[in-house]
Structures are given as structure tokens and as C-alpha cells.
Amino acid sequence: MSGTTIAVIGSNGAIGAAVVEDLLANGVQVLGFDRGDTPRDSRIVHHALDFADLDAGTAAFRAVVEDHRDTLSGLVIASGLYPARHMADETPQTLADLLLVNTVAPAVLVEAYVAGILGTASAAPRPQSIVVTSSLAARKARIGSGAYSASKTALERLMTTTALEHLGTGIRINCVQPGYVSSRSEINPIPADYEEMIARRSGGLVVPADLVGIYRWLLSDASALVNGECLAIDGGLHIGRTDDSAWVDDGHR
């Protein structure tokens, strides 16, 4: 991967910044995209991207991709919102705002990236890997996460369909499904007692740095045969809970 260029949307966020740091450490040039004009890491080439005007933002993003199509080898989308609300408290506006950030924007930006890379060609000039951040919440219903879960479930279906539509072009698209990640986000503040509960249940908290190896692998040629997948990164929590069993003799455990 050294000597290539990767675009990272959400480069100022917790997961995005961790991915950026890891890529830089591995000799990759990073094009960062996030709100505002100030990058979290001054070593990247930063571009302001605001989903509030998605049409203009998408056009500007595609133009950057076209300018760097000879060196770009991948895209990471690490932007997103994680609100906790009962469905009774959702409104048309809160649902629309969440779906814009978590579902619509990633979908159109991925297509803009593909269009910028392909141009009028039928195949990419070099192999491309797109890694989109979903969530373990896409796998199951949970009180307080209905809208969030739906936004990530829809995102995954859009991404797997997009991967299918571009099969054979040299462009791969995969999603990662982190479990709960302690990000200390100001945009998505999480109560301390909730994190304490998660830590007790799972044996510790996952931090963004724990995830970067998976992103790097998916971006690399080592995962060349992986396409259209949604990979859980949660230490096995999606398998089930050890304190939830049938009426068996505990002596056999």
C-alpha cells in the first residue's frame, strides 16, 4: 500500500482519525474529507465536506477523485451519527437527518468515487477497495436504536448492491460492523454508566485503534477476493451471550 493514496470521509472523527494515522504510518498518502477547514491531522490533504449541501459536496468530492485517479487505490467512509431515541420520540425530521448522514450521503459519495475513478472507462486504472463503516446494530433490533439500526441496515444493502453492479470493474466494496466503540465523541456523547455496562459485559471497551488493522487489510491486495461482505468486528459478541443458555448442566460448560 505504500506510495498509494486513500480517501477518508470522516477523517476528523474517532474511527476516521485512527484509520488516517495507521495509513500514514504505512506510507499511504491520505485525502481527508470532513466538516470545516481544519484537519485533525496536519499531515493529510484536507478537503471540507458538509452533508448539509450534499449535491455541491458530492460534485466537489468527485472532482478531487478525478484529479487523483492515477494514485488513488481506495476509499474509507467513517462518518456517521449514533443517536439513542425511542421510536415514539422520532419525527420525520430526525429520521431524515439520520438517514442523510448514515445512509444517503455514503451511498451517493461511493457512486461519485466510482464515477470519478472510472470516467468513461469500463475498468479502474488500478484495483480499488472501498470500505464503508456500518455497525453491529444492523444485525439486530435494540430498544433505543431503531432508527440507527435501520440506517445501517439500509446502508449495507445499498453497498452490497453497488458492489454487485460494479463487479468486474476492479472495484471492491465491503462494510465493517464494529460493535460498541468508545470514541469520546462530542457529536455523539455517550453516558459514562453505559460504557461501564458495556465494559462489564464484554470484558473491556473497544477503542478506534483496535479496528484499524481490519480497515488496512480490506484496503490492501491481501483481501482481493473479498467483495460485498459485511464483517463483524466485535470480539464475537454477535455470536451470542455466555449468560444466555438453555436448561443445561453448567458442569458441562
Image (cartoon, rainbow, N blue to C red):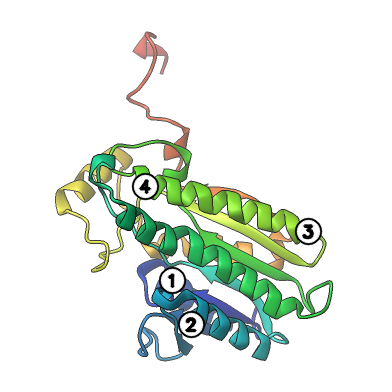
Residue 147's disc number = 4
Mark 4 or 2, nearer chain start: 2
Q: Nearer the viewer, mark 1 or mark 4?
A: 4
Query: What amino acid is found at the position of numbered circle 3 in the picture?
Result: Leu
Q: Which SS class for mark 3?
A: loop
Nearest the eye: 35 or 93: 93
Crowd class of label 2 (few under 14; some 14 to 19; many from 20; radius 10 Å): many
- Expressed as whole percent of the image width and height from the top left, the position of residue 64 reads 59, 87
Q: Nearer the viewer, mark 3 or mark 1?
A: 3
Snapshot quadrant of residue 15 = bottom left
Crowd class of label 1 (few under 14; some 14 to 19; many from 20; radius 10 Å): many
Task: Give yes or no for contact between labels 3 and 4 (Cβ–Cβ under 8 Å).
Answer: no
Q: Which SS class for mark 1?
A: helix
Q: Which SS class for mark 2?
A: strand
Mark 1–mark 2 Cα distance, whole angstroms, equals: 9 Å
Q: Nearer the viewer, mark 3 or mark 4?
A: 4
Mark 3–mark 1 Cα distance, whole angstroms, equals: 26 Å
* Quadrant of the frame with the N terminus: bottom right
- Expressed as whole percent of the image width and height from the top left, the position of residue 197 reads 21, 42
Mark 2 or 3, nearer chain start: 2
- Expressed as whole percent of the image width and height from the top left, the position of residue 199 reads 26, 46
Mark 3 or 1, nearer chain start: 1
Query: What amino acid is found at the position of numbered circle 4 in the picture?
Result: Ala
Q: Which residue is mark 1?
A: 16
Task: Give yes or no for contact between labels 1 and 2 (Cβ–Cβ under 8 Å).
Answer: yes
Residue 167's disc number = 3
In the image: residue 42, left or right of residue 84: right
Nearest the eye: 73 or 145: 145
